[in-house]
Amino acid sequence: IIIIIINIIIIPDDAGTIAHAKYPKYLNNGSVSVGATLRSMVELIARPCLHPMGAQPFLFVFLLCYYASLYTSAWGNLGPLFDDKPHVRTRLRPELNWDWGHHYTRVSVDNQRVSSVLSHVLNYNFTLPRIQLERGLTYLGSACRLRRVVRDLLMGRDVKIGVVGGSVSWGQSATRRGVTDWFSTLSSYMVNAFPTANITARNGCTPGVPSSYMIMCLELSVDPDVDLVFLEYTLNDGHDDKLYDNSIVRNIERLIRRVMALPKRPAVVILHHMSHYQAHYPEGHPKSTGSFRPFYETSEDAQGALAHYYDVQSLSQRTAFYRLAQHKEVPGFAWEEIFADFHPGDHGHKMMADLAVHLVQQVAVGLVMHAYGPADEEVVGEPLPRPMYKGNLPPDTSMCIMNERFKLTVVESRGWEYVNEGTPEKPKPGYVASLPGSVLRVQIDTDRSALGSTAAAEEPVHVFFHHLRSYEKMGQARFSCVSGCSCNATHVDALIRERVSQLYLAGMQVTQAKACVIEITVLDQTSDPQGRHKFKVAGVVVSERPGKPTGITPLGGHNQAFGLQQHTGDAEQVVISKAGRKGVTERRRLQQHPQGQTQKRRQRRRLRRT
């Protein structure tokens, strides 16, 4: 009874989102509020559990319902999510592939066939039919920035490509991340299509987090001299049914401005992924799971205004897939053949890559017809227009201050040393102290007066320090404001019982100031049995906006573990170039032969024992 009552109190509504951010490998569904589901079930049985007859029968029923919910529609009506062969039904479909063949041999410019000039560029096998490729290109515009990138590729120059987004673009549900996910498929195509160019493609995606986080921490995911960036956040950003004052569109606008303002004025392409339950069948359909979102229930259409306003290209998975999967139910293009759960399988990833490849090819053909010239250069060199939403300006610098940039914030250090406790492949740098009384002072900018709101100028700004917690050697420290700003001091004990070493967040609410100095002092007291006092600070995150720390909330808060391995050094980001792949963690599908089936049965037995 006590456990039930405690659960009612402590399980947060966003527990599902938080768990998905920390454990994306195991929790594929970021939309289902696990906390809300558990809490509603607990509330249903809490009252009868208090009956004088005793709680045991009701607890038995509760546990039975709980485990049953993992495999039924009570856990979100996910339908094929728990299918034991998602990689089989979403496998690649080479029998559906096609290419341009002799299509462009009939087109000549200056007595040169387009098929000869762009022979490598046009050499690609599509899975999506041509009509759907054209439907999926929802906004092309003048594409001046993208034309410049493709021109540089054709001229054999150095070009860097990046992607930021959620678990879909990270490679979730692809059988071989770094190989069969859509961005890796695109990257491999680019390396082959432009053999004289030096291409570096970096996957900077962070599973389970919204665009508001990437506004703050963009520099941890893309190179400063990047030339082309894909954005994929429509799924992770959820829903806002407002047409005009849409919070999702506001966030995406600030992210677009941050990317477009980078030194090389990169091109931006928005790749829209379908919202939760859109890739399901409507009520009354034989394959309906009971959950369904219609075509229009997505922020994609509202974000279309940004594509027009900033002339950034837009690709739509929804528009490309819908006719085949929903209207016509064409074999090979059914929802369950495209999606493993909310994430696409290999087949779905391949068709997302098709959209991006088709865009590149269309721009390349356009360059043959109309060469890149002064008119394009003039547009590329123009300053960004005023924000579409008045005052919706992003920060002009990274709010995630880590690694070498963190060193620049330190104004005083006594007893601390900056060291890398990791490896060159997986660096784990930070300031480390081992003696009580060691003082580290960090100066940050918490001023948000540029937002133009008097109310916003008076609200505190959330600041989170990355610090190491471990099961041995760790001591305690106090975080306090000493100059320029004020805050309540925060006390942190870095010793934990779990036998892990992981970065945690120490949160503070700080008044606004251009030069806010925060002091970290190692304390005399320690919980370590041997009296040791080690403390490590790895970085600081300053909220982009005053008030609620929306960008950092999905990753935890004060006194919570920071589980985003792509930004802590615990996981390498995938990089593809002529030299090969780096940072790949492949998940190979078991082969469909007796030995493979035996391996699969062993896996299931291990899972049941766990």
Image (cartoon, rainbow, N blue to C red):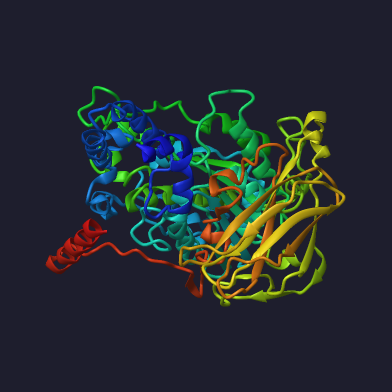
Vertical position of residue 398 compared to residue 139: above or below: below
- Where the C terminus falls, by quadrant? bottom left
Residue name at image x 71 percent, y 51 percent: 373
Residue name at image x 15 percent, y 69 percent: 595
Tell which of 196 and 267 is nearer to you.
267
| One can see residue 346 in this view | yes
Vertical position of residue 161 compared to residue 528: above or below: above
Q: Residue furthest left?
A: 594
Tell which of 328 and 151 is nearer to you.
328
Q: Residue furthest front?
A: 52
Counting from the top left corner in percent of width and height, residue 108 is at 51, 52
Tell which of 607 and 183 is nearer to you.
607
Residue 30 vs residue 290: left or right?
A: right
Tell which of 440 and 142 is nearer to you.
440
Counting from the top left corner in percent of width and height, residue 601 is at 17, 61
In the rendered picture of this protein, how many numbered marks are placed on residues?
Answer: 0
Instruction: Name the quadrant containing residue 338.
Output: top left
Instruction: Name the quadrant containing residue 57.
Output: top left
Residue name at image x 26 percent, y 45 percent: 82
Vertical position of residue 80 compared to residue 87: above or below: above
Counting from the top left corner in percent of width and height, residue 175 is at 33, 59
| One can see residue 370 in this view | no
Counting from the top left corner in percent of width and height, residue 231 is at 56, 47
Vertical position of residue 464 compared to residue 521: above or below: above
Residue name at image x 60 percent, y 63 percent: 494
- Where the N terminus falls, by quadrant? top left
Residue 212 vs residue 261: left or right?
A: left
